[in-house]
Structure formats: structure tokens, C-alpha cells
Image (cartoon, helix red, strand yellow):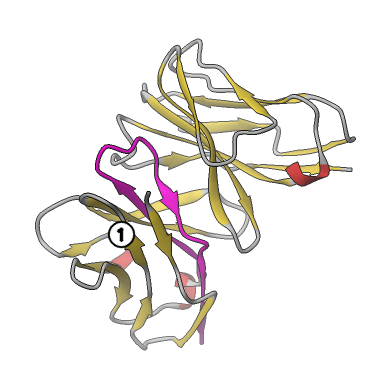
Amino acid sequence: NAGVTQTPKFQVLKTGQSMTLQCAQDMNHEYMSWYRQDPGMGLRLIHYSVGAGITDQGEVPNGYNVSRSTTEDFPLRLLSAAPSQTSVYFCASSYLLPESTQYFGPGTRLTVL
Amino acid sequence: AQSVAQPEDQVNVAEGNPLTVKCTYSVSGNPYLFWYVQYPNRGLQFLLKYITGDNLVKGSYGFEAEFNKSQTSFHLKKPSALVSDSALYFCAVKDTGRRALTFGSGTRLQVQP
């Protein structure tokens, strides 16, 4: 099993550009989520999904879109990048609701100039 | 609402000494509590969790945590610290009926040889 994979590992964008961060898991997990990690602020939840076709907003959803067309994939879209979105982004998955152990991907470091 | 606090940004301990990383939480119902660890340039890894039952929870790498309902705390402990324990530690909580975790801001543990 590859676990949770994220691409790309690093990305630099200019303000106003759009891009998609990819996340995939091969553990047949229903629950997937996206977090951003900023110094001194821990992890903040952006969006999550409890299964294919079902998504919901987390703590900091503005500027981000998600979709869940398959169990395996949960891409995160930045619609119009802003410097405030400079962060490290982590995708996570778990078997069921988040009281199950969450497995995290290696992260994507995004810089917006 | 659910929230979690990690009052120490950094904890320093000598190798071989016991360590404690503090966590307090606030929930409306019954809490699900977690500890995760992050090594440099890596995603988070699960250490242990409390769902119900015994207040003392044992986890990976010799770590344990004690659930204290009256003090709303879930401190992480280890009897004898190793240099390799140096990392960033996150406490997380989920309230009954909620569908997402809330993470603390993290505590950096430095174990000196």
C-alpha cells in the first residue's frame, strides 16, 4: 500500500493563478480531509468528505474548492491564489469518521508570490 | 464548539528524564482525544487515542496519556525520553456528533543528549 500520496511536493504560484493539489489513498477509506499548517497555528481544517459525492466545509474554507468523485481521490483547488494561502497543505484519510486513526500524506509546500 | 489548547510552545528535557506535554480541551459532549507526532518535513503520525474506557492510554514508542475528565486534560507522557523523540506534537479533539477533529497549535519537544 502506498498510503496517502500528495502531489506536487512543492509549488510556487503567482497571485491570481489557480491550481489543484492532488491527494489519493489506496486504503479504501471513506473519510478524507484537507488541512493547512501555519507556524504557531497548528493544523486547520479546510474541507472534508465522508464519502464519494459528499463534502463539507471546515474551519477555513474560503478560497478553496473540493470534490470527491471517487473513494480514492480528493483534490483541493485554489481558485485564485493569494499570498495568505502560502502554507503547507496536508491531506488525511481514515476508515470512517475521524475517531478512526487518520493517516496523513507527506504534504505540499505552497508559496504564493 | 470544540477546542483544544497546548499551553507550551516548546518543552525541553534531558535524555533519560520523564517528559510531559500538556493538552487541555473543551467540548459539549464526550470527547475523543488524540495525540499525533510530526517529524521534520513529514506528515503527522498517530501516537494514541482515547475514545472510552481506561483513563490511561498506551500508544506507540512508549508514550502514554492520561484522560482527566475533571481537569479536561489529556497530557502526553513518557517515563524516559530519547533524543529521537524530538519532534512536534499535536493534541486533537472531537466532540460527540461532530464530523471533524480540531488540532492544537503544537508543542515542540527537544530532548537533549
Is A62 left, or right, of A105 in this rendering? right
Q: Name the residue beneath numbered marker 1.
A: B60
- The N terminus of chain A is located in which quarter? top left
Q: Is residue B56 magenta?
A: no
Q: Name the residue at the left extreme.
A: B53
The image shows residue A57 at horizontal and vertical percentages of: 51, 30
Q: Quadrant of the C terminus of chain A?
A: top right
In the displayed structure, A89 sits above or below A66; it is below
Q: Residue at x 45, y 12 (%)?
A: A53
Residue stretch in magenta: B87-113
On screen, A67 above or below B94?
above
Q: In which image quadrant can residue A77 be found?
A: top right
Task: Please tell me whether mark 1 sits on a helix, a strand or a loop.
Answer: helix
Q: Nearer the viewer, residue B8 or B17?
A: B8
* Residue B108, magenta (yes or no): yes
Q: Residue at x 31, y 33 (%)?
A: A97
The image shows residue A39 at horizontal and vertical percentages of: 65, 60
Helix, strand or loop for the magenta stretch, by majority: strand
